[in-house]
Amino acid sequence: MDASVIIKQKAKLAALDVEGVSHAFGPTKVLDNVSLSVPRGSFTVLLGPNGAGKSTLFALITRLYDNISGQIKLLGMDVRRNPSLALSRLGVVFQSRTLDLDLSLSQNLAYHASLQGIPHSKSKVLAEAALKRVGMENRSSEKVRNLSGGQSRRVEIARSMMHQPNLLLLDEPTAGLDVAARESVISIVRNLVKEENLGVLWATHLIDEIDPTDNIVVLHKGKVLFKGTVPELFSMTGKTDIGDAFRSMTGLSQLEAE
Amino acid sequence: MSTQAIGESANHIEQEIRKKAPTSHLGGYWTCFSGILWREVLRFLHQRERFFSALVRPLVWLFIFAAGFRNVLGVSIIPPYETYVLYETYITPGLIGMILLFNAMQSSLSMVYDRETGAMRTLLVSPFPRWFLLLSKLIGGVAVALLQVYVFLFIAYFWDIQPDGPALAIGLPMGDAFYGFEIPAPINGYITVLPALILSGLMLGALALFMSSVIRQLENFAGVMNFVIFPMFFASSALYPLWRIRESSPILYEICKFNPFSHAIELIRFAFHGRLDLTSLIVVTGCTIVFLGAAIYAYNPSKGLIAKRGGIGR
């Protein structure tokens, strides 16, 4: 195969492919035959109320535990058969705060770089660049304890991007943030999608975080009720508002608030 | 695009990624290990209160408890001691064990709690194999414990607690001649105790790591104190020779003998005086392997207990 064909085909390979994944803890089925795809360079919203199965899906993709049925592939690589390779292309921002409060920003980033096997000689430059991207380059020697919620989220995004992953997972990244901080976090991630051709899977229960150009996956009680673009959502449900469309699909009066 | 073409390009990409993957060369493993170790030590040094309380705890026992009990508890001559020893000297290995035990429980069981749950997940999304990550974390915990132990021993030195084993000879014997050098007491004991400290630290750390994956109910550290640390510490040879326990309760004596913590302390006690207690070495090594295996199994994504339960600390 010549190089240009490979590059073209590589572009078509999805950052994430989930096919027919079900998962249960004891008798409770948490995920029921879930399939979804996150193309490269796309912002895909995983929309669902608390308890829809979003966190379980993330635990399976990050291999906290294995999927028992179905397949999860990163850039075509099965996470069960090729865990090391798949995880090396993955960046994650967890819902809970995961930075070391007593360490400085650059120490946190250096630790994360070493977990990705990036030697200290290279990680320093990468850390500076990553902090610059989220507008935190002037605070690299400060302790995380001094940062606001929005600032530490931005540092977590910088951290997750240090090893230049192809897929970025974010689990309710704006939970507990004020409006300004939320907007800045969202715009940073949207820029990454454009500039780095990154595939993003953004789990949320907040409808106003959705942009008309996003891909949407609606997850409810462990089942995928819809996947597609916003216009497709409207034409399927006959509504002109994402909230209305969601309510008509799930029968819920509203998404659970925090 | 045909299915075959997609398959081929996927293969191509896989090869490309494999070449770049940090897990493809040993240097990556070293970077990862040293990073984990560095973080554990750095975090410990930043938590001054933890360092302080970790040091005060055994010193209170040494300076106050041991002084008070010096005349109550007579210690007869038992190996490895060749003369009557002061009670302070007897309990020092037990207090070292206490430092190791507290440290293991603190660093591993903290994973159970919410604040640390995220840190554990950050560790586990690293592309390196899970057994390697867990073992690195354990060794990091042991490194922190060693710092505490040696500072404690340094202070205890001025309380006249000093190793008195035969000089440590390093070199090659050639016929009647000996090429090398000798390390005299008391420095020799601080060197010979090191392997015993590392092994015991690993055993206790692995036990705590396993517990962190099994236990859901422990709400706070007080629970760990009551149900793990105190029983393990008091039902051992840390504070009194086991023959004294046999006098009052033969059943308790059997329990103490069964307690791996007793063996860790005896291993340290003998090593501190330049001697090897083979039984203890075998028991501690065996327990380390079993506990470590159990912990790695528990954190295995497909078989482990976390997979059955659905998350850490849930």
Image (cartoon, rainbow, N blue to C red):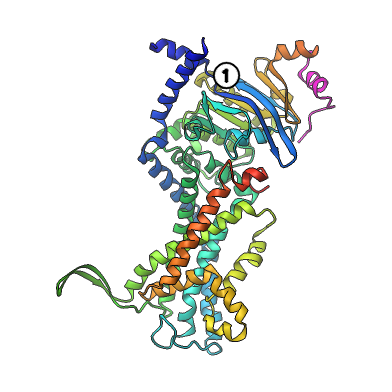
Can residue A249 be found in the magenta stretch?
yes
| Residue A172 painted magenta | no
Q: Residue at x 41, y 83 (%)?
A: B81
Vertical order, A235 against A84 (above or below): above
Residue beneath the point at 67% across and 58% down: B220
Q: Chain of mark 1?
A: A
Residue A27, quarter of picture: top right
Span shown in magenta: A240-258
Percent position of residue A181, x then y: 64, 31
Q: Label 1 sits on what residue type?
A: Pro
Q: Nearer the viewer, residue B245 or A128?
A: B245
Q: Is residue A230 left or right of residue B246?
A: right
Q: Nearer the viewer, residue A164 or B224?
A: B224
Give the x, y percent position of residue B100: 50, 64
Q: Residue at x 44, y 50 (%)?
A: B37
Q: Which residue is mark 1?
A: A39
On the question of residue B148 being in view, the answer is no
| Left or right of residue B31, residue B306 in this image | right
